[in-house]
Structures are given as C-alpha cells and as structure tokens.
Amino acid sequence: MPAHPAAAPVATLPAWSWRLAPALLVCLAAPAFFVLRVPWVGWALLAAGLAIAVLLERADASARRSAGPDRDETDADGADGAGGADGAGGAAAAGGADGADPGERSIRRPSIVRDLSLIAIGLLIVSSIPLAAELDDLSIVRFGVVLGGAVAVPYVISRWAYRDHAIRFPWRGGGRWNAFQWSWLAAVLVLGWLILPFYFITSGVYLNWPVVDTPDLIARLFVGVGAVGIWDELFFICTCFALLRRHFPFWQANVLQMVVFVSFLWELGYQAWGPLLTIPFALLMGWIFMRTRSLAYVVTVHLLFDAVVFLVLVHAHNPGVLDGLFLV
C-alpha cells in the first residue's frame, strides 16, 4: 500500500528522545486503569508523565533562548495542523531545535505537554466507567456518552483551546483503494473465520459478553460491537497514535498506542491469551493507517473483523444455530 504523498516527512525525527519517557508513563496508565484496575496507579502515572513533559519542554525553551536572537523560529503548534492526523506535522516539527545552524530558520517542535494532556484526558474519561460489556439501555447510553466524550473532548480542546488542529479524522485519506487493499479485506475475513472461533470458544472468553439469545439482544450486540470498533479507530489511531506520531518515529508511536489499545480490549473482554491476537492487531491498524492515511479503510478492516466477532459470540451463546459456519 503506497503512502499518501502528504505523509512524507520534511525532516527526520530523532531515533530516540527524552520525550519518550513521559509518553511511556502516560501510555502505561492504560494498563493500570484497564488491566490492573487500580485507578490511583493510573492517576500517578499520568501526573508523573505530564510533570516530566513540562520539565522537558521548559528545558527546550531555555535551550532555544540561549541559542540567541539569530534563530528565526516558527511555532509548529499552530502551523502543523495539516500533518497532525498523519504524522507529517510531527515529522516537520522535529527539525526544530535539533541541530539547525544559527542562521537557518528552524521549526519549534509541537508541544509534548499539550499532546500528552489530550491523551491523558481521553484515558481519564474512558476509565470513569467499567468496560465490561452490557446490553441494557443504561449501559449503552453510558458507553455512548463516555466513549464519545473521550474522542470529542480532546478534539475540541485541540482545535479551539490549543488551536493546533492536531487531531483530524481523514476519512478518504490516500484516495482510491488499490488491489492489495481490497485483497486484504478478504484476508481479514478469512483470518477472522479461522482464528476467532477457536480463541473465543476454547478459552471461554465469550462468557465475558452477555448471553444473546433473543433477536433484541442479538441486534444490540451487533450495534455495540460495530460502534466500539469504530470508536477504537477514532481514539486509539486518529487521536492517540496521531498525537504520538508528532513526536516519535512510526514504530515508537505505534508501540505506545498499542499499549493503550490492548489494555482497553483486555477490560472489554479480550482476556486469557487474547493479547496474542490484540497486540498484532493493534500494531497492524497503526501501520495500515500510516500507509493509507484513510480512516475509511481502517474502519472497514476493523468492522469486517468485528463482524466475525459478532457471529462467533452469537454462535458460542447459541449452540446449534451457526454450527455449519465455523470449524469450532
């Protein structure tokens, strides 16, 4: 899948940066919230990560001031919005205070404090409710309000408070899908059909989802699985990954978003040996988004996978109904 031209970085991000330390702390709050389920540990990690980010940003500002008035700096926080969702802005900004000659124009890095604060806000919102799957009216409304807020609040703050447009949702992205992308959609269905029934049924994790044995409950499950799948891409990829990509090389940003993604899926119900599936899945979604720049494509991939999840859950809770569809 060829990368969209807008993805091409105009400067090289450093292979390693001290900014990785606060970003790691913020992302490690996710397993504290969703795996260990010890909220105070998550709060402490978020606070420590943001505090270190503030110190690093102050040190960067001090270094820029000491460089003298000859450096004509442009603040990338507002100028890099076009690249916010696809990483190009972060790559452009990385060329800032790192090695430019005194007489050259430099670009200041995006604010690590702002970007990590947006991720932290999203995590705090999501962690405010238990994530066990429930299908009653109150649970559905609660999920909708909280998960929707975890996407909407960071977006609103980024756009109208920080005014950096760092979070975007590029629906079309890289244009028309090529033959490989269409083939991959078919492969997702085949892989899901082969792997997911074995995982859900032999591990017993299908019991983490409520019994669906009536048309109403089956319809609610279908809508819920699809809605959460779309939300995953809006929050973990278009928000967390895009913000991290402004500061770190692709593989580092992708691993960090994977930690958050997989932790959420664990509390949602993908337990037992589920991380053996969810870790590569989360990394793959980041890679696909980086290559295609298309929210529509990553959502389609995710929804196809979740369609198989839905069918497997119906099959597991209703023996004999879909026995001819799966091998397990």
Image: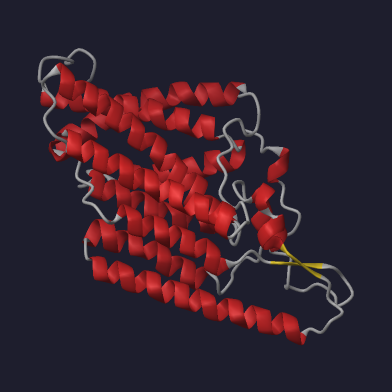
> Which residue is nearer to you in this view: 57 or 267?
57
Q: Is residue 78 above or below residue 299?
A: below
| Farthest right residue in view | 103
Q: Is residue 304 above or below residue 256?
A: above
Q: Is residue 45 left or right of residue 62?
A: left
Q: Is residue 179 above or below residue 256?
A: above
Query: How far across and how far down the image is residue 56, in percent?
Result: 57, 78
Q: Quadrant of residue 39?
A: bottom left
Residue 80, given in percent of the width and then of the height, sits at: 69, 55
Q: Quarter holding the N terminus?
A: top right
Q: Position of residue 77 (x, y in %)?
A: 66, 61
| Residue at the (34%, 59%) spot, across then down | 124
| Residue 175 shows in the view | yes
Seen at 53% across and 77% down, the residue is 54
Q: Quadrant of the C terminus?
A: top left
The x and y percentages for residue 213 are: 10, 22
Q: Quadrant of residue 2?
A: top right
Residue drawn at (41%, 62%), measured in percent from left and top? 120
